[in-house]
Image: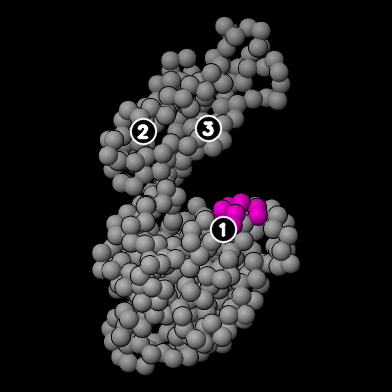
Amino acid sequence: MIEDIEARKHEFVAWRHALHENPGIGFQEGFAADMVEKKLTEFGFDEVHTGIGRTGVVGVLKGKRASNRAIGLRADMDALPIAEETGKPYASKTPGVMHACGHDGHTATLLASAWHLSRSRDFAGTVYFIFQPAEEGLGGALAMIEDGLLDRFPCDRVYAYHNMPGFDLGHIYTRHGTMAAGCTFFTILVQGMGGHAALPSKTIDTTQIASNIVMTAQSIVARNVDPNETGVVSFTDVYAGTNSHNVIPDKATLKGCLRYYDKAVGEQMKARLQEIARGVAATYGGSAEIEYDDNFVPMINAQEPTDMALDVARKLVGEDKVHADFAPLSGSEDFAYMTEHAPGNYICVGAGPGANPHHPKYDFNDEILTTAASYFCRLIETELA
């Protein structure tokens, strides 16, 4: 660990708690963005740019030695629409919104790294500190890229991390190749013909259509996806009704997501789900249309950045605490859009026992903050030696 980061741990934790108390969902991270801008300015950054991808912030820090190389370090800032149940003294002050995934910790980690590196500047080249909004399904990374992020701040490589409750405290996990799944949200709109529940023969029952779409769609992975590939079909919201016991509804809406590690598999799953939705609806006399939102692509850890990340991690925490064969995450991460444009690596840092992310009792484990910050700093010192 880096000694001055460990010595200031209490201050970095206080920053994290302040962020936790003042959460903002995607593109509403006003407190976090303002705090980041203020801190980077206090640290004496060469440049601080705000409003990138609406609420994103990028800090530019140049090393003491000249070089054309540049490395990007990224942290996400957004919270989730979840009512907090942690009972912590620094619990969310915003009703119905909380940092239930640890983005407050990720932001505080990158600020701690920025503090240390701004004091030493012991590297050759430039570091771009990327504070990203709206990671939780709203496309914040893509919004920053479309706003010119990697054109204005071109990175030779990009790096990020995520905390991992349930994994050994302080251990570092990564892998070469696919690290996280791509994700497509879908909405299926079913049209039937409503009527009296006592006269079903006079109706086209959308509850029957919706139920059969849910069941038949499970055959996509079982019978259409290559057994050597991976896919997940999840229905998360199914609604058909009029709040009545004796009315058959004329409309139904189904929502969910597809997960996949290969884009081609994702396209195959999308095509098959559309065929099933329309086919099942037609079988029972109705119709169905489907809308897709491709909000995550698969995240790929490139060879050389991953080699670098593993080397730095082993020197930081020891060989026995680094795991290079981590199974790909079935969840998604929009840092993947950045690694589509620049080679990069994503690690997970074990946070020990605790509630899982996206749970109302979840809280970031402050014990890993200095480990992750030291990792980022050692990474820069090595990459830009």
Q: Which residue is mark 1?
A: 353
Residue 152 at least partly seen: no
Position above or below: 189 against 15? above
Asked if residue 64 is among those painted magenta in the image, a careful observer would answer no
Graded by Cα atoms within 10 Å as few (under 14), some (14 to 19) or many (20 or more), the crowding at tag 2 reads some
Q: CA distance from mark 3 to mark 2?
A: 18 Å
| Residue at screen point 28% across, 63% down | 302
Question: Identity of the amino acid at label 3?
Answer: Leu
Q: Give the x, y percent position of residue 239.
A: 59, 30
Q: Considering only order in the chain, which callout, 3 or 1, is on the residue closer to the N terminus?
A: 3
Graded by Cα atoms within 10 Å as few (under 14), some (14 to 19) or many (20 or more), the crowding at tag 1 reads few
Which span of residues is magenta-colored? 353-361
Q: Which residue is mark 2?
A: 221
- Assign a secondary structure to mark 3: strand
Q: Which residue is mark 3?
A: 254
Position above or below: 278 against 129? above
| Residue at screen point 36% across, 62% down | 323
Position above or below: 213 against 304? above
Q: Quadrant of residue 35?
A: bottom right
- Assign a secondary structure to mark 1: loop
Q: Considering only order in the chain, which callout, 2 or 1, is on the residue closer to the N terminus?
A: 2
| Residue at screen point 62% across, 21% down | 249
Graded by Cα atoms within 10 Å as few (under 14), some (14 to 19) or many (20 or more), the crowding at tag 3 reads many
Q: Give the x, y percent position of residue 360.
A: 65, 53
Q: Considering only order in the chain, which callout, 2 or 3, is on the residue closer to the N terminus?
A: 2
Q: Quadrant of residue 299?
A: bottom left
Q: Main secondary structure of the magenta part?
A: loop
